[in-house]
Image: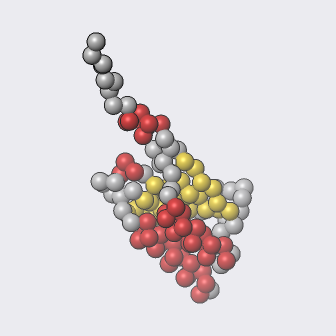
Amino acid sequence: MPKVRSANLDWKVNVLQPVMFDKHELSIILGVYGRMVAAGEWRDYGISCLRDCAIFSAFRRTAEHPIYRIEKHPKLRNRQGIYMIIGMDGQILKRGHELKSVMHILERKLIRSVDH
């Protein structure tokens, strides 16, 4: 009796796994976070790993809305880019394929806050 091969079910594993930041991405994000904490701009953060995106939220105080959200959307890889920075009002501030270049907008804000 011939064996019947089952269909490739790898796609189900990928769909059910949440999107996460990898070690390299987290080191870039936490490097900027550390500099912003040292400057007194940020105090807390939260990480959400959802089915379609990963979100790093930065807060000025714990009990308020995030000042910035750094989001990773792998489905947008071939479009506007995987990474985006979203402001407190929901406006997309920067979008791109490279995390370092997207994070540059937050570095500029750090330079501005130190000058004052």
Q: Residue at x 61, y 62 (%)?
A: 58
The quadrant of the image that shows the C terminus is bottom right
Q: Quadrant of residue 6?
A: top left
List x then y, in percent, for residue 33.
Answer: 60, 69
The reply to whether residue 87 is visible in this rendering is: no
Pick the residue in front: 21 or 40. Answer: 21
Up/down of 45 relative to 6, above or below: below
Q: Residue at x 72, y 55 (%)?
A: 63
Pick the residue in front: 48 or 9. Answer: 9
Task: List the single residue furthest toward the bottom.
Answer: 115
Q: Residue at x 40, y 62 (%)?
A: 95
List x then y, in percent, for residue 108.
Answer: 50, 78
Along the horizontal axis of the image, is 106 left or right of 98?
A: right
Up/down of 62 relative to 3, above or below: below
The quadrant of the image that shows the N terminus is top left
Q: How many marks?
A: 0
Q: Residue at x 59, y 58 (%)?
A: 57
